[in-house]
Image (tube, helix red, strand yellow):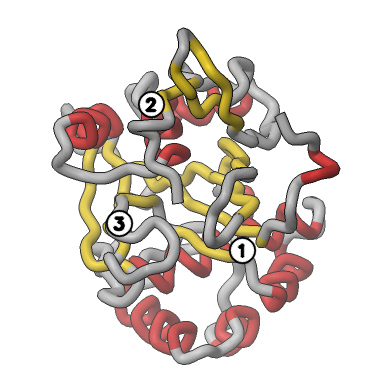
Amino acid sequence: MTTKEELPPARPAATLVIFRQPAGGEAELLMMERAGTMAFAAGALVFPGGAVDAADEIPARMFGAELDLAEAAARVAAIRETLEESGLTLGFAGNVDAELAMEMRKRLNSGENFGAVLEDFRLELALDQLVPFARWRPNLPHARVYDTRFYLARLPDESHAARVDATENVRLFWASARNLIARAESGEVRLIFPTKRNLERLAQFPDFDAACAHARSIPVDTVTPWIEERAGTPHLCIPDDRGYPVTSEPTETALRH
């Protein structure tokens, strides 16, 4: 297994796992289908998120003084990327209506700085609304390597509907973790290795509160998968002390990008 010192450079990234709770039903998560032309995870289902930009440090310093700067910037990136990709405004202090969200999204997608957009509309972020869940940092032959922090967040009851950006992502929908795993097993949808493992972990819990209680009970230590032979078959493996019920999968079936 490669030591931490030998790991190649990785770009910081952040992902937001968004929960909603239908009346009388299982908790559902917002999923996006990546465009087939994308260099990373083409055609796969993913949670909203993306790379941390240097400019994310500006709102991070403004609204995350109690946090390490890298942690605060990652939370800002998760909020910003979710807005860009779905139009949803999670992690804001107060409600943001659909019209304002659309205007912010338009400006972000045109390349404007998130901090400047927030200042223009006199909006503040509430970074404590995001609950740290996991951190993955692959060390396998990828086209791009990301050091990704995963956060949990609850969709506000008064939230407007999500809308796909139709660029990087071509479809978005809500589904329970168990439903998504079953659809992946049947071949209906495609999940890369980290997404599948995180869905299996989330499927253990009936709602957002239970998932958060679990997340807070386990330190967020970086997960770096490795390959080893088990029962004569190469497996992609992760540590067994990070809260995941499934910690290995044959490399033949593990989708990695």
- Looking at the picture, how far across and down is residue 144, in whole percent? 56, 61
Circle 1 SS class: helix
Which residue is at 81% across, 44% downward?
A: 6
Earlier residue among tags 2 and 3: 3
- Looking at the picture, how far across and down is residue 111, in whole percent? 52, 89
Classify 157 as above or below 36: above
Residue denoted by label 2: 200
Q: Amino acid at mark 2?
A: Glu
Distance between the alpha carbons at the discs numbered 3 and 1:
20 Å
Residue denoted by label 1: 76
Which residue is at 60% across, 85% downward?
A: 113
Residue denoted by label 3: 32
Classify 15 as above or below 194: below
Which residue is at 44% across, 33% downward?
A: 198
Q: Is residue 238 left or right of residue 7?
A: left
Distance between the alpha carbons at the discs numbered 2 and 1:
26 Å
Which residue is situated farthest in the right direction here? Answer: 5
Q: Amino acid at mark 1?
A: Val
Rendered image quadrant of residue 39? bottom left
Which residue is situated farthest in the front direction here? Answer: 232
Rendered image quadrant of residue 112? bottom right
- Looking at the picture, how far across and down is residue 163, in whole percent? 25, 68
Q: Nearer the viewer, residue 222 or 202?
A: 222
Earlier residue among tags 2 and 1: 1
Say few, some or many: other residues with alpha carbon within 10 Å of mark 1 (under 14 / 14 to 19 / 20 or more).
Answer: many
Classify 221 as above or below 256: above
